[in-house]
Amino acid sequence: MIKNGTNPYFVTELNTGYVVLGDYQKYKGYTCFLCKMHVTELHSMPYEYRIKHLEEMSIVSEAVFHAFKADKMNHAMLGNLDSHVHWHLIPRVIGDAPANAPIWRLPDEELFKDSYRPDTGELQEMVIKLRKEINCLTSIYEN
C-alpha cells in the first residue's frame, strides 16, 4: 500500500524505513517505523545499515515526542507476531493507562476500539504534523 500510494497512514520514507501512524490512536501519535530491509532481528542487519536505522528510528521518535507533546516515549521492537524488524513508537502522557506498564497490558478490546481510529481529517492533520517535524529534524541532523 505504501509503494502504490494508497496507505492513508503513511507519513514519509527515510533511507532505512517507512514511517506510518498506527491504525488505532488510543495514544495520540502512536507510530510505527518499518524497516525496508527484511530481517527478523536487529543484529541481522549489516552494521552500517543498523546504525543508520537506529539513528532514523531515534529521529522519528523525537519527532513523535514533539509533534504530539508526549511526556515520555515508549519504544518497542518485538516481532513476536510479525517477524520483521519494526518499531512501535508510543507517546505517553501523564495520566494515561496503564500508568506503570507497557500498553500491551491492556486488553485488545481496549487498545483497538473503533473510536480510536482517526477520521480522515484528523488523520491528515496528524500525518502533516509528524511529516513536518521529521523533515525539520532530519534537516538539522544532516547538517
Image: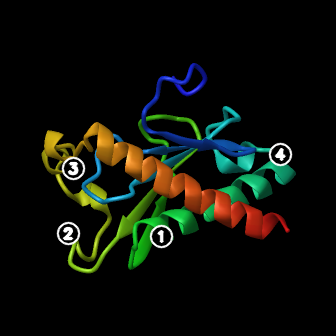
Residue indicated by mark 1? 65
Mark 2 vs mark 4: give the one in front: 2
Q: Amino acid at mark 1?
A: Phe
Which is nearer the eye, 131 or 19? Answer: 131
Label 2 vs 3, first from the N-terminus: 2
Q: Amino acid at mark 4?
A: Pro
Gap in Å between the C-alphas at discs 2 and 4?
37 Å
Residue 87 left/right relative to 57: left
Which is nearer the eye, 41 or 12? Answer: 12
Would you call the spot at circle 1 few (<14 residues within 10 Å), some (14-19), or many (20 or more)? many
Residue 61, above or below 34: below
Percent coordinates x, y for residue 8 in the rendering: 43, 33
Residue 88 makes an appearance in the image: no
Q: Are marks 4 and 1 in contact (CB under 8 Å)?
A: no
Which is nearer the eye, 13 or 121? Answer: 121
Residue 104 makes an appearance in the image: yes
Label 1 vs 3, first from the N-terminus: 1
Percent coordinates x, y for residue 128 in the rendering: 49, 50
Gap in Å between the C-alphas at discs 2 and 1?
18 Å
